[in-house]
């Protein structure tokens, strides 16, 4: 029996969900298939650049890939992406023959100066080739989005605080607000709420979520047993993050 660390698990989750397929229903489709490793980038003053490998998994078709970067911030429950020139991504566009690989480099254009971690996104988008003669379906363009974190000069870590949402949900779910008062992001997954003295979850949040430094997010938990407590306050929260296990009591929400 093999085991993996939670960090490895979260990296794999990110890899499984990185590809976004843009298509509509059709009788036939045409698309390339490429993978990227690693699936998360961390840069710092000591390590201002990193190499990633993009592999064309197709056995008979080349793929053209274009790179772009975006600054990543959060506002309440929304992720916000804006154009940026802070990062260098090279080569900006390239062709990978069938079954071959391409090394790309992501680097800082200037040393980090902020007192907390800064977040970006790296996008790798397929540039579809011209359709083959007689093709009558819809082409599918693959796009991957990878997180890029710029570490500050000093030590950094997330500090998460969990509390019930100010207003109870009316749809049978439980809502929690998590606030990150630390200087680094947290990626959380496999969250479960249970009553005091009972390990059986009453509600769970199975998806993973990022909480950037200085930001808050509201997470929705679904019932595990068909009956949901009226409020999350007083329940016990467990789960995982890329900064360590989560084991916390849920505080009452501010009204």
Image (spheres, helix red, strand yellow):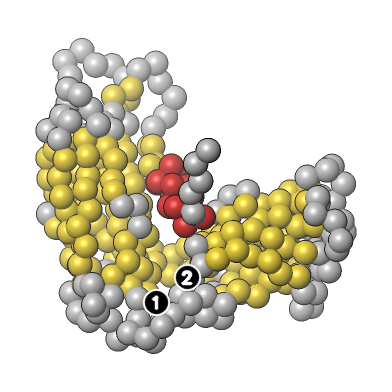
Q: Is residue 167 visible?
A: no
Alpha-carbon span between mark 2 and mark 1: 7 Å
Figure quadrant of the C terminus? bottom right
* Residue matched to label 1: 117
Residue drawn at x 28%, y 70% is 43
Residue 206 left/right relative to 211: right
Q: Position of residue 60 (x, y in %)?
A: 17, 22
Residue drawn at x 49%, y 41% is 2
Residue drawn at x 76%, y 78% is 254
Q: Is residue 103 above or below residue 148?
A: above
Q: Quadrant of residue 29?
A: top left
Q: Residue furthest front?
A: 1
Q: Which mark is residue 185?
A: 2
Q: Is residue 45 above or below residue 1?
A: below
Q: Are marks 2 and 1 in contact (CB under 8 Å)?
A: yes
Give the structural element (helix, strand or loop) at label 2: loop
Q: Position of residue 156 (x, y in %)?
A: 44, 80
Give the mark nearest the N terminus, 2 or 1. 1
């Amino acid at each position: 029996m093999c085991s993996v660390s939670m960090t490895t698990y979260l990296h794999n989750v990110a890899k499984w969900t990185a590809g976004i397929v843009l298509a509509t229903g059709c009788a036939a489709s045409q698309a390339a298939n490429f993978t990227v490793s690693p699936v998360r980038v961390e840069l710092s003053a000591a390590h201002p650049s990193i190499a990633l490998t993009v592999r064309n998994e197709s056995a008979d078709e080349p793929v053209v890939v274009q790179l772009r970067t975006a600054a990543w911030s959060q506002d309440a429950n929304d992720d916000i992406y804006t154009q940026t020139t802070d990062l260098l991504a090279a080569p900006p566009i390239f062709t990978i023959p069938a079954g071959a690989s391409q090394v790309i480099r992501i680097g800082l254009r200037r040393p980090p100066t902020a007192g907390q971690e800064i977040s970006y996104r790296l996008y790798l988008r397929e540039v579809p080739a011209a359709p083959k003669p007689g093709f009558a379906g819809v082409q599918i363009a693959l796009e991957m989005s990878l997180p890029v974190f710029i570490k500050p000069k000093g030590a950094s870590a997330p500090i998460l605080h969990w509390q019930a949402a100010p207003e109870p949900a009316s749809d049978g779910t439980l809502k929690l607000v998590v606030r990150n008062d630390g200087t680094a992001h947290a990626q959380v997954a496999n969250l479960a709420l249970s009553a005091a003295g009972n390990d059986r979850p009453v509600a769970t949040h199975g998806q993973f979520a990022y909480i950037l430094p200085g930001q808050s997010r509201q997470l929705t938990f679904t019932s595990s047993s068909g009956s949901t407590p009226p409020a999350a306050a007083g329940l016990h929260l467990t789960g995982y993050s890329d900064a360590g296990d989560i084991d916390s009591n849920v505080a009452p929400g501010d009204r």
